[in-house]
Image (cartoon, rainbow, N blue to C red):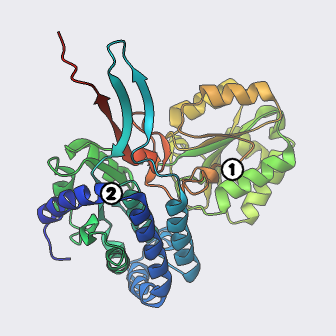
Amino acid sequence: MSSTVAEICRNAKTASREVAKLPASARNAALLAMAEALLAEAEPLIAANADDVTAAKGAGTSSTIVDRLTLTEGRLASMAEGLRSVAAQEDPVGEIERGWRRPNGLLIEKVRVPLGVVAVIYEARPNVTADVSGLCLKSGNACILRGSSIATHSNTAIVDVIRRAVQTEGVVADAIQLVGDTSREAALELMQAKDYVDLLVPRGGKSLIETIERHATVPAIIDGDGNCHVYVDAAADPEMATNIILNAKTQRPSVCNAAETLLVHSKLAGTWLPSALEALSAKGVEIRGDDEVRRIWPDAIAASKDDWSAEYLDLVLAVRVVSDLDEAIEHINIFGTSNAEAIVTEDLSAARRFTWEVDSGSVFVNASTRFSDGGEFGYGAEIGISTQKLHARGPMGLRELTSSKYVVWGQGHIRT
């Protein structure tokens, strides 16, 4: 796409007004057309993605990033199913959240409305291209996508396919736009397009987040790091604890809701921990432990202070023995990133304290952190996972892409 960032933003603003007027039936039909188009065009999409994957491997890109980048027929099918699921969601646009009548007869309604233009800057995740497009369209918004250079061929191909698809259902193509310029300068221009962009969601690493915090003048919701913890309490079921940490760490280690730190109550350290670490090691996980962990399991590498705050996105796990629930909560609140935290316990009071005192967007009891996901929450897809507290927190779906306005009905009322 040869348009400049300014042109893209202007076109998106115009398109957003058209999309906001569409009935839910038209928006849903466009989503279903997008899903069908992804499947019908699977072969050229996978071919375009192969160019990106080949280039990434040739550049020595890590296996975790290559995994995030890679499209398969199965992943395209999941993208299509996500769009269908979003289409089936309840439409938030036009919903009356509250309504009340004042003593003077005025009827006041609080109504949910689209934000307008949503921009997302993201890295090597081509599935985000379809997810964001679908969520924005369903919620009555236009979207501007700015992926990374590593996924240029993939993102361009996906956007071309879904733009053609929405047009068949009467939706203006500029409701979905890709910034083809992957330079830092183009990203900065998008971050500062405050006359056009109503919300910016960055989905990337620390350097992107720091750049947003330093330079963005448009409102932003931070989708930050995922330093997720699993705490195995003294009252944990041992088999359950092993299954949960294996899933949280190894099921897909390259994503932000994978566990990066295991905290273990000292009462279980000598009995449960050795077998759990053996099971993790058998899955290829490198263990970095504190002094007590290394005493119990000598194969562990000595953990440094940096390991407690690391988002590895790889088969590496920091492990620490804690004396009690208080120490576990304190550790998480110091080093956690508000993405997802989990406790494994049969003690209801401990579970309740953990869920109340741990400062995170999602807290799980006897479940893997891998469930911190819009799709798993029933949203069909997600715009991202908010690790801040204003407007939205945790996995963000359709409602988080809307705002509200007050509609006031009178009968010739004047204020005296």
Q: Name the residue under label 1.
A: 368
Q: What amino acid is at disc 2?
A: Val
Q: How crowded is mark 2: few (under 14 residues within 10 Å), some or many (20 or more)?
A: many
Which mark's residue is nearer the viewer, 1 or 2?
2
Q: Nearer the viewer, residue 389 or 8?
A: 8
Circle 1: element type: loop
Q: Which of 171 and 264 is in front in this view?
A: 171
- Residue 222 in sight from this viewpoint: no
**Does 211 appear above or below 79?**
above
Rendered residue at 70%/57% (across/down): 247
Residue 149 coordinates in the image, percent (x, y): 30, 72
Q: What amino acid is at disc 1?
A: Ser
- Residue 86 in sight from this viewpoint: yes
Judge from the rendering whether residue 87 lies leftward or rightward of residue 166; answer left or right: right
The label shown at residue 120 is: 2
Residue 124 coordinates in the image, percent (x, y): 41, 68
Q: Answer with the quarter of the image where residue 176 lies.
A: bottom left
Circle 2: element type: strand
Rendered residue at 77%/35% (across/down): 233
Judge from the rendering whether residue 164 lies leftward or rightward of residue 78; answer left or right: left
**Does 296 appear above or below 127?**
above
Residue 81 coordinates in the image, percent (x, y): 56, 70
